[in-house]
């Protein structure tokens, strides 16, 4: 298979699709003012081709912040695209669609992957999708788009998750997750006074969450929202650490991008040597896949902001391009199999 990336910084879809001949699966990354028009135009250009889309930034060796990006797979994939609706209340109501698409595409854990764009309620969505994918051991990579809407096959859906089931006809697929954080000190916190619906942590070890965070890191209220780039919370999940980013300060509480429950045990994380970690990820992929057709990745918005502040974003994209055809989008949360993660990079590699 081959991966196509086209872009237009001005949002000209014809420019972004120039050179795209016979796609077998398409991903649209648009902006909030042109999304509806782009979805309609894309379907007119490539009627009947499985497609998913959302509002968000895209990239290959350069980033598209406000225009439009097209990522497409050609020459050797079997694909199907659809949506699960009502993700905030009852995504399982539409699970038959996914079951049918998994059957239609065929494949196995060796050669098939699910890519999704979600509008929200990610943890519930991933649990729902996993009830189907786990039967065949199929992996998933995806993320959250902006403005609470996604597209599939030329239609726009609010409160939904759009997904593509993709089978590589010419080799393996494998998913990866990159974490650039490690534990800071031996801090351990028991969360309480949480609001699961609003992702709020009220207290840590019985003290106001904001006060605990500030007393350790010596930051002001205003600095908390940028300090989380370097010091998010973490939740131990088996042999993995789930990163929990701070979204906002609400009185003496902290609102996060991921749900925290009463009695959850949290740790504090600190930023590692992200440049060295990127090189390790690239080396690992090269060892696993000496020959690569494509790499599709999802980078967290906070990683994008951090790398931009460190004047590393452009260098990062250049380094990832050493893998060959690398493209992806910037999400508001990243999906890795059945897990909703923050401040991470997830990707799928096609042989």
Image (cartoon, helix red, strand yellow):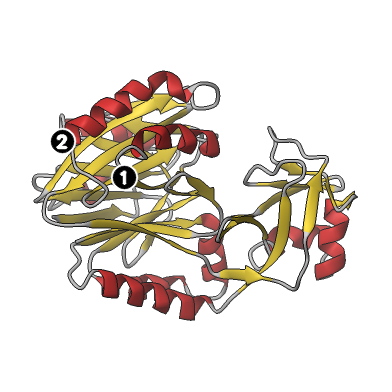
**Is 195 rendered above or below residue 16?**
above
Tag of residue 227:
none
Q: In the rendered view, does 251 fall on the left or right side of 151? A: right
Q: In this view of the protein, which residue sits in the foreground, 271 or 153? A: 271
Counting other residues with Cα less than 10 Å from the Cα at mark 1, is it few (<14), some (14-19), or many (20 or more)? Answer: many
| Residue under the image location 23 percent in, 61 percent down | 294
Residue at numbered disc 2: 46
Please, what secondary structure does the residue beneath circle 2 have? Answer: loop
Instruction: Give how far across and how far down residue 264 sits, in percent.
Output: 72, 47
Could you give the CA–CA distance between mark 2 and mark 1, rounded to whole angstroms? 27 Å
Instruction: Give how far across and how far down residue 320 sits, in percent.
Output: 34, 71
Please, what secondary structure does the residue beneath circle 1 have? Answer: loop
Q: In the rendered view, does 180 fall on the left or right side of 74? A: right
Tag of residue 138:
1
Q: Residue furthest right?
A: 207
Residue 333 appears in view: no
| Residue under the image location 54 percent in, 39 percent down | 123
**Is 89 rendered above or below residue 236?**
above
Q: Earlier in the sequence, mark 2 or mark 1?
A: 2
Counting other residues with Cα less than 10 Å from the Cα at mark 2, is it few (<14), some (14-19), or many (20 or more)? Answer: some
Instruction: Give how far across and how far down residue 186 sits, in percent.
Output: 76, 70
Instruction: Give how far across and how far down residue 164 sits, in percent.
Output: 29, 39
Asked if labels 1 and 2 touch by Cβ distance under 8 angstroms, the answer is no
Q: In the rendered view, does 71 fall on the left or right side of 304? A: left
Residue 51 appears in view: yes
Q: Residue furthest top?
A: 93
Figure quadrant of residue 50? top left
Mark 2 against mark 1, which lies toward the viewer? 1
């Amino acid at each position: 298979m081959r991966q196509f990336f086209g872009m237009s910084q001005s949002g000209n879809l014809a420019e972004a699709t120039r050179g795209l001949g016979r796609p077998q699966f398409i991903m649209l990354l648009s902006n909030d003012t042109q999304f509806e028009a782009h979805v309609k135009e894309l379907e007119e250009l490539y009627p009947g081709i499985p497609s998913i889309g959302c509002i968000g930034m895209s990239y290959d060796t350069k980033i598209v912040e406000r225009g439009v990006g097209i990522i497409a797979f050609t020459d050797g994939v079997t694909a199907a695209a659809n949506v699960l609706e009502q993700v905030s209340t009852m995504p399982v109501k539409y699970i038959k669609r996914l079951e049918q698409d998994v059957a239609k595409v065929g494949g196995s854990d060796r050669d098939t992957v699910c890519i999704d764009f979600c509008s929200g309620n990610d943890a519930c969505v991933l649990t729902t999708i996993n009830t189907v994918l786990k039967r065949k051991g199929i992996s998933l990579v995806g993320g959250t788009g902006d403005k609470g809407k996604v597209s599939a096959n030329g239609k726009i859906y609010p409160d939904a998750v759009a997904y593509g089931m993709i089978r590589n006809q010419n080799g393996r697929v494998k998913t990866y997750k990159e974490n650039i954080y490690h534990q800071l000190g031996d801090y351990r916190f028991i969360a309480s006074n949480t609001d699961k619906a609003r992702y709020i942590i009220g207290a840590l070890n019985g003290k106001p969450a904001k006060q605990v965070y500030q007393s350790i890191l010596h930051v002001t209220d205003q600095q908390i929202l940028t300090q989380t780039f370097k010091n998010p919370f973490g939740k131990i999940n088996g042999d993995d650490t789930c990163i929990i980013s701070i979204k906002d300060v609400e009185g003496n509480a902290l609102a996060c991008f991921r749900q925290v429950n009463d009695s959850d045990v949290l740790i504090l994380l600190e930023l590692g040597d992200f440049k060295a970690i990127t090189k390790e990820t690239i080396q690992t992929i090269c060892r696993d896949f000496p020959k690569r057709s494509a790499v599709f990745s999802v980078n967290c918005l906070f990683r994008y902001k951090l790398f931009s502040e460190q004047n590393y974003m452009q260098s990062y994209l250049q380094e990832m391009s050493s893998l060959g055809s690398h493209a992806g989008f910037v999400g508001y949360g990243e999906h890795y199999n059945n897990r909703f993660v923050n401040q991470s990079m997830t990707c799928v590699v096609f042989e």
